[in-house]
Image: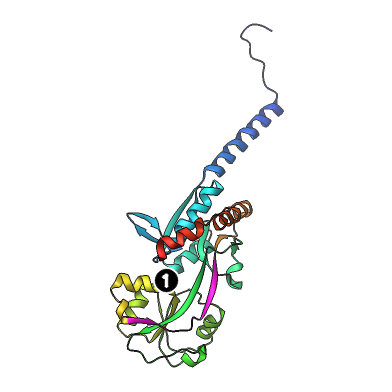
């Protein structure tokens, strides 16, 4: 072979090299790509502090993905928009979300809850309303709820079928606190830590009180849209979250914000 003369590659070899290069590039992009996750903007679970997302759920999810080797970006927005964005496939995942049949149609859930929400009723401090566990007995009161938020199957059913006919919808827990403090609504189901924190931030903690007993405790999860296959991501997240519960770092995050 003459010095410096190139031997032409065969057509099949060129195709093979091109395919290998494409696979390498795609694999690199898939590995490096951040997952985009959304959450409702509410303290103490997910909120902005010093210009970046923080909170119980933000810290839990961030640490689990750090352990699994996956980079993420978290966006906070009203809950109804969170659901719309993940349903349409505009973002990868959402947290935290209850398991409901209508949501399982478009969401693939992780196995381990990121939080168990303790649901209670709140009323104005001057209110004479009492709760003995009978949800239908509250039908004559003006109830405030967040739009597109699930409060568990029993309350959801009462709202949807009209058993509670006096329902006011709003977009955030801050609005619910303001309406309750101003006596524009009589009662609101909510998640204890979130509602109490919102009342504290608004300076309305002395204007609201919690009814007992609690309605129920509901596990809530991280979930992904079903427009792509996140099977391996879910497996790795489950493993990482389980390790956080074993080494107590999961509990430490909760203690940091709730104690």
- In the picture shown, does residue 109 fall above or below 175? above
- Return the residue nearer the eye: 69 or 8: 69
| Quarter of the rendering containing residue 171 | bottom left
Q: In the rendered structure, does residue 41 fall within the stretch colored magenta?
A: no
Q: Residue at x 46, y 69 (%)?
A: 80
The answer to whether residue 90 is visible is no
Q: Residue at x 66, y 27 (%)?
A: 14
The C terminus appears in which quarter of the rendering? bottom left
Q: Residue at x 40, y 57 (%)?
A: 54
The N terminus appears in which quarter of the rendering? top right
| Quarter of the rendering containing residue 234 | bottom right
Q: Which residue is mark 1?
A: 193
Estimate the x, y position of residue 61 in percent, counting from the top left: 50, 56
Q: Which residues fall within the magenta stretch?
A: 208-220
Q: In the orientation shown, which residue stands out farthest toward the top?
A: 2
- In the picture shown, does residue 21 fall above or below 173? above
């Amino acid at each position: 072979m003459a010095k410096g003369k190139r031997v032409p590659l065969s057509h099949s070899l060129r195709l093979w090299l091109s395919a290998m290069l494409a696979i390498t590039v795609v694999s690199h992009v898939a590995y490096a790509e951040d997952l985009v996750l959304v959450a409702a903007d509410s303290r103490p679970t997910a909120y902005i502090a010093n210009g970046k997302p923080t909170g119980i759920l933000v810290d839990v999810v961030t640490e689990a993905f750090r352990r699994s080797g996956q980079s993420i970006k978290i966006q906070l927005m009203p809950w109804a928009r969170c659901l719309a964005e993940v349903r349409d496939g505009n973002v990868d995942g959402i947290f935290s979300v209850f398991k409901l049949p209508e949501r399982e149609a478009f969401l693939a859930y992780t196995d381990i809850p990121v939080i168990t929400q303790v649901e209670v009723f709140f009323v104005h401090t001057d209110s004479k309303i009492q709760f003995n566990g009978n949800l239908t007995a509250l039908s004559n009161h003006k109830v405030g709820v967040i739009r597109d938020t699930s409060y568990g199957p029993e309350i959801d059913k009462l709202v949807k079928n009209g058993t509670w006919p006096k329902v006011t919808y709003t977009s955030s827990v801050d609005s619910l606190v303001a309406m309750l403090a101003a006596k524009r609504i009589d009662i609101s189901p909510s998640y204890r830590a979130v509602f109490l924190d919102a009342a504290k931030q608004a300076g309305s903690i002395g204007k609201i009180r919690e009814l007992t007993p609690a309605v129920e405790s509901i596990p809530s999860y991280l979930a992904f849209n079903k427009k792509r296959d996140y099977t391996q991501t879910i497996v790795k997240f489950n493993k990482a979250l389980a390790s956080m519960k074993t080494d107590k770092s999961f509990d430490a995050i909760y203690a940091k914000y709730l104690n």
